[in-house]
Amino acid sequence: MRDILPDLRARCSDGIPFALATVVAVHGSAPRDPGAVLAVDAAGTVVGSVSGGCVEGDVYEVAREVLGGAGPRVVSYGISDDEAFGVGLTCGGTIEVLVRAYATAAEREDLAAVLDLIAADLPVAEATVLSGAAETGARLVVRPALAPGTPGTPGTLGTLGSEGLDAAVTDDARGLLAQGHTGIQWYGAHGQRRMQEVAVFVRTYAPPPRMLVFGAIDHAAATARIGSFLGYRVTVCDARPAFATRERFPVADEVVCAWPHDYLEATEVDARTVICVLTHDPKFDVPLLASALRTPAAYIGVMGSRRTHRDRLARLRAAGVDEAHLARLASPVGLDLGARTPEETAVSIAAEIIQHRWGGTGRPLGELSGAIHHPGGPTGTR
């Protein structure tokens, strides 16, 4: 959704009717994950993608039918028949796509409210009925629960058709939102658990994950650029005011001049945060890593030679860090790509972050067999 967010907001504000196709399920290998979207407006203009080109033509026709009043539909696409030139996925998987229209001003206004939250990096979940006893296309928007007395708007917008179903989906959507997960949930007609009468697709939009880069060096500038490209909210931190400047890191969302461990202990770190320590200076590294290893960060990568790494481990052990925590360190940072330049090193670091996130092997795909896309790891986080 984020990749076509400006286009969708423009259509809502300009009063242009459109249909939105959303990948709601993937079985086997497929080009796009659940949550990928394609929009077709009344003029026939297309933005976005649900399959990288394999089935876009057919989805376009379905979208035009839905926009013409045919009603919401869930369509499935499987393996293509090469001899018959049938519509399908050449990669061998199956996807299910929900197509629904935002034809009226009220429908576009409701969607615009969600798009505004996404644009502001505020968490929100959108639940849509796919099939079963409830009406296909029925929609419920869910905001996170807030602590008593906390300002904000935690409530819901819309309904899936029954109070019990709304309550159950609201509870589950908030749980999925906290984890950054997207997927199909099953319920009874009135929200009963462990029943499969109603399929509900819950799409979560969490704020972008954070990348914390410590050490304002050339490698940090390249790492900040690739981190921003991957969708992270990037912070660069260094204790030296001459180096921690906006001019040196124009792509970073935030440039902080502070002692690294002081900043880390005062900022928010969650299970999606990645930490890249590029200082390779013991007076910065040791207190910083001792703090970083106490956080739930998804990845902690540290630059330095193997000799530097051994010295660093000794210093951390002397500081009281145990072996279980030390095992979390990705050091020396990055995958073995033969990188030389700061930019190549940044690619190496990014590759290792992706490997950690999705559980890849880091080996050439041509040497492997089986599914290309690993089933593990989170979805719907960006």
Image (tube, helix red, strand yellow):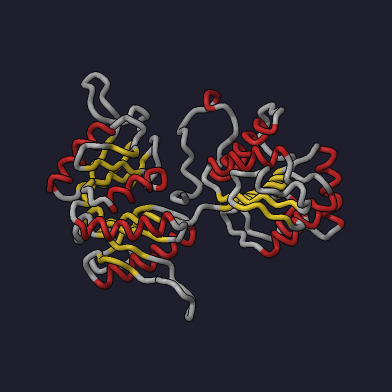
Can residue 197 be seen here? The reply is no
Would you identify the image quadrant in which residue 108 lies? bottom left
Residue at 77% across / 57% down in the picture? Answer: 259
Q: Is residue 191 above or below residue 372?
A: below
Q: Is 316 placed left or right of 66 in the picture?
A: right
Residue farthest left in this picture: 69
Closest to the observer, 102 or 81: 102
Residue farthest front in this picture: 247
Q: Position of residue 322 (x, y in %)?
A: 78, 57
Closest to the observer, 322 or 108: 108
Q: Is residue 321 above or below residue 354?
A: below
Q: Is 234 placed left or right of 215 in the picture?
A: left
Residue at 59% across / 59% down in the picture? Answer: 270
Residue at 15% across / 41% down in the picture? Answer: 65
Closest to the observer, 26 or 286: 286
**Number of labelled discs?**
0
Residue farthest bottom in this picture: 149
Q: Position of residue 368 (x, y in %)?
A: 53, 27
Q: Is 298 placed left or right of 333 in the picture?
A: left
Q: Position of residue 162 (x, y in %)?
A: 23, 69
Q: Position of residue 101 (x, y in %)?
A: 21, 49
Residue at 48% across / 39% down in the picture? Answer: 374
Can residue 333 be seen here? The reply is yes
